[in-house]
């Protein structure tokens, strides 16, 4: 029997999905793919049902404040927006990422309201001081910490290791540095439970790497891209392969890491990595534009 050539009902010309009538659990799954800025600035304004989903505390267990760093060109205040997102979590926040706009006050705000926070990611947050960083972080039960292109001291790193005894993941990314084993030795001394360690651009040498291998026996993933003071050959390379499941070499490609951009030139002549492209999946379904008073997002209740 010949198969029918008529398209299924859902495929008929002119028919489209009504995104506002999806079940709440499906809407939530879709909106979880957006960052916090997109949710607060756009998605929650689409309709009442999306607004209700966006106010559910479960939507805010993970907060991603990714942005491109063009703070002067924004019509809204990212710090106020971030505080609002933290409030919506109602204490359930477990993972937060902040790009460019982090401050000491914001970090302490998060620490006071997020006793369950396990993962903190800071990228290019130059306004946060060492003292302010330590004051906030020692209050948190962190297991994952990322400090990409920040300028915290090795003393701060050591205090974090001494206070966050269950640290399992550390990402400490920089522009390529001159030879310096201070970070590596602090990590080796204070973070023995590490499983994932990313040190892109760090100045550690063979000495620092051996110290990490000596003391971090649970290490499963070691990323040494752009660590050009490490001579990863011979016995040291063999030791890495025998001790660690996944090892990234100093000259491996760096383009799968999204660490933003900066107006500051890399003193070693390396360009910043490509920026993450925007997701256009929802483009064309709704007009998300509209003015807003960013000091109070709850004014949009329906």
Image: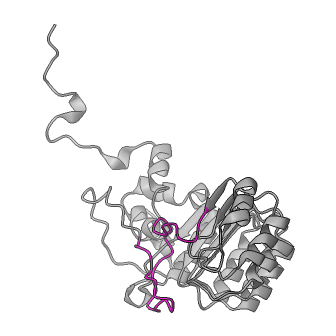
Between residue 54 and residue 99, name the one nearer to us.
Answer: 99
- Magenta part of the chain: 248-275
Residue in view at x 40 percent, y 73 percent: 274
Closer to us: 94 or 211 = 211
Give residue 271's position: percent from left, percent from top.
43, 82
Query: Disc count in the image?
Result: 0
- Residue 283 lies in what quarter of the image? bottom left
**Residue 201 left/right relative to 182:** left
Q: Is residue 170 visible?
A: yes
Magenta: main secondary structure = loop
Q: Is residue 178 above or below residue 110?
A: below
> Can you give x and y, in whole percent of width and height, for residue 151 in the image?
64, 89
Residue 13 x, y percent position in the rendering? 14, 38
142 magenta-colored: no
Residue ID at (72%, 69%): 114
Q: Is residue 174 above or below residue 199?
A: below
Q: In which quarter of the image is the C terminus?
A: bottom left
């Amino acid at each position: 029997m010949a198969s029918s050539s008529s398209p299924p009902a859902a495929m008929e010309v002119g028919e489209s999905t009504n995104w506002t009538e999806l079940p709440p659990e499906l809407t939530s799954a879709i909106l979880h793919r957006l960052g916090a800025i997109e949710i607060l600035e756009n998605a929650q304004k689409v309709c009442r049902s999306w607004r209700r989903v966006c106010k559910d505390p479960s939507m805010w267990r993970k907060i991603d404040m990714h942005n491109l760093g063009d703070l002067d060109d924004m019509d809204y205040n990212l710090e106020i927006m971030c505080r609002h997102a933290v409030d919506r979590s109602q204490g359930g926040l477990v993972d937060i990422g902040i790009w460019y706009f982090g401050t000491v006050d914001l970090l302490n705000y998060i620490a006071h309201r997020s006793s369950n926070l396990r993962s903190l990611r800071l990228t290019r947050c130059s306004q946060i001081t060492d003292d302010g960083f330590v004051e906030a972080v020692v209050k948190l039960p962190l297991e994952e910490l990322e400090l990409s292109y920040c300028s915290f001291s090795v003393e701060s790193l050591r205090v974090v290791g001494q206070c966050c005894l269950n640290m399992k993941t550390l990402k400490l990314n920089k522009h390529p540095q001159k030879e310096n084993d201070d970070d590596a030795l602090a990590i080796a001394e204070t973070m023995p439970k590490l499983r994932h360690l990313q040190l892109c651009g760090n100045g550690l040498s063979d000495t620092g790497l051996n110290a990490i291998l000596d003391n971090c026996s649970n290490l499963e993933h070691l990323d040494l891209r752009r660590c050009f003071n490490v001579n990863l050959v011979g016995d040291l390379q063999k030791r890495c392969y025998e001790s660690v499941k996944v090892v990234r070499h100093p000259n491996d490609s760096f383009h799968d890491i999204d660490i933003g951009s900066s107006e500051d030139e890399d003193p070693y002549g390396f360009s910043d990595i490509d920026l993450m492209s925007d997701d256009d999946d929802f483009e064309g379904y709704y007009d998300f534009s509209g003015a807003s008073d960013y000091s109070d997002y709850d004014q949009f209740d329906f």
